[in-house]
Amino acid sequence: MVFLDPAVPHGTTPYRGLTESREAWLAVAATIEPEVAQYFLISARCGCFMQAARSLNIKATQLRKRLAQLEEQLRRSLFSYQGNVLTLSREGQQLQAQLIALSHERRLPVLEQPLIRLAVAESILHDILGRDLIALLRRNASVRLEIISIDSELGLQALDADVVVWLSGMDSPGAGPSFAIDAPEVLARLDYSPHIAKRYSRLAVRPDSIEDLADYMLVQWQPDRQVEALRPWNSLVEQRLAGVVQVQAYPLMLEMIRCSACIGLLPRYMSCFDRGLTALDGVFLEGMQRQVWMGVSAQVRHPQEVGWVVEMIRNTFLERGEWFD
């Protein structure tokens, strides 16, 4: 290992010819721990400490501390800012070149991340969990997460996942997933009502009975057609001889309600999710309710990582508790 002379003043070259000699920089690069070398190279490639920390699955403060220790060890400033852009100093560029050369001789370790499979009912994924999943990925760019959208009971039965979030009736979790899970957990109860965009219906003339719906086009998300808990709505749609559209894509149904003066059946939390929508309460005398369930595979191979996902889901539903009251 190459040692620095502590008597060398800061800002002077501790190695003879260090700034000029490629061999000297190669010798220095060879003494750097592989993990620290990886931190430096990824930071140099990303040009952003925050992004590099996400890629490495560590905190930005930890990354900055290790790089500061490296700069103190070399007594060189390796990074500089040009405006708001992080760049390498001349010494940083020389170190980068030699570490890249060494990487062809010794492969720097890549920490494999466990694959976590998360299956979620499509409407729940779109309306409730989507934003927090994005936040999770923003914090950790190295995560290996497979997200599976469930749009039917058949799809629920056919999947295999570590964590599954699904919808069922009020009495029980229904058939549930086909693989063995721990005791399922109720996350929320959902009440359903027809919804319309506020801009297409003035308060004084909004429909308040099934008969009033005759003047509006109805839109239905196809996977809901076979849901017994939504039978009052499904019966109305099936009786329609005109003024009805069936769609396979959940986001398309929402856009048709928002932009085409259509009325569609949605959970009542949608007026919290989208302030431009309003629920038509009282149209159906018979209530329509479902429950959101979560199950964790009984054969989880990576309990710590799965635990993080489960905690994120629980926190999301807790934070949005007023949506379901």
Image (cartoon, rainbow, N blue to C red):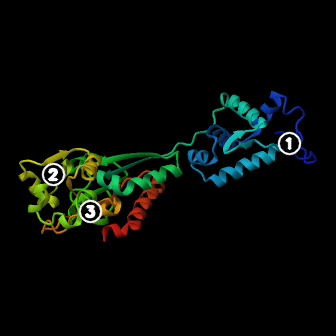
Q: Quadrant of the C terminus?
A: bottom left
Q: CA distance from mark 3 to mark 1?
A: 71 Å
Q: Secondary structure at mark 1?
A: loop
Task: Give the percent coordinates (x, y) of residue 167.
Answer: 26, 58
On residue 288, which mark appears?
A: none
In this picture, residue 183 sits left or right of residue 318: left
- Residue 180 makes an appearance in the image: no
**Residue at x-position 33% and y-position 52%:** 120
- Nearest to N terminus: mark 1 or mark 2: 1
Q: Secondary structure at mark 2?
A: loop
Task: Give the percent coordinates (x, y) of residue 126.
Answer: 34, 52
* Nearer to the camera, 250 or 8: 250
Q: CA distance from mark 3 to mark 2?
A: 16 Å
Give the amino acid at mark 2.
Answer: Met
- Residue 222 makes an appearance in the image: yes
Can you identify the residue that label 3 sits on? 278
- Nearest to N terminus: mark 3 or mark 1: 1
Q: Are marks 3 and 2 in contact (CB under 8 Å)?
A: no
Task: Give the percent coordinates (x, y) of residue 186.
Answer: 31, 65
Q: CA distance from mark 1 to mark 2?
A: 79 Å
Give the amino acid at mark 1.
Answer: Phe
Up-down relation of residue 308 to residue 3 (above or below): below
- Nearest to N terminus: mark 3 or mark 2: 2
* Nearer to the camera, 266 or 164: 266
Decide: few, some or many residues near mark 2? Use Cα within 10 Å; few <14, some 14-19, many ≥20: some
Give the amino acid at mark 3.
Answer: Thr
Can you identify the residue that label 2 sits on? 217
Decide: few, some or many residues near mark 3? Use Cα within 10 Å; few <14, some 14-19, many ≥20: many
Q: Secondary structure at mark 3?
A: strand
Residue projecting furthest to the bottom: 325
Q: Quadrant of the N terminus?
A: top right
On residue 3, which mark appears?
A: 1
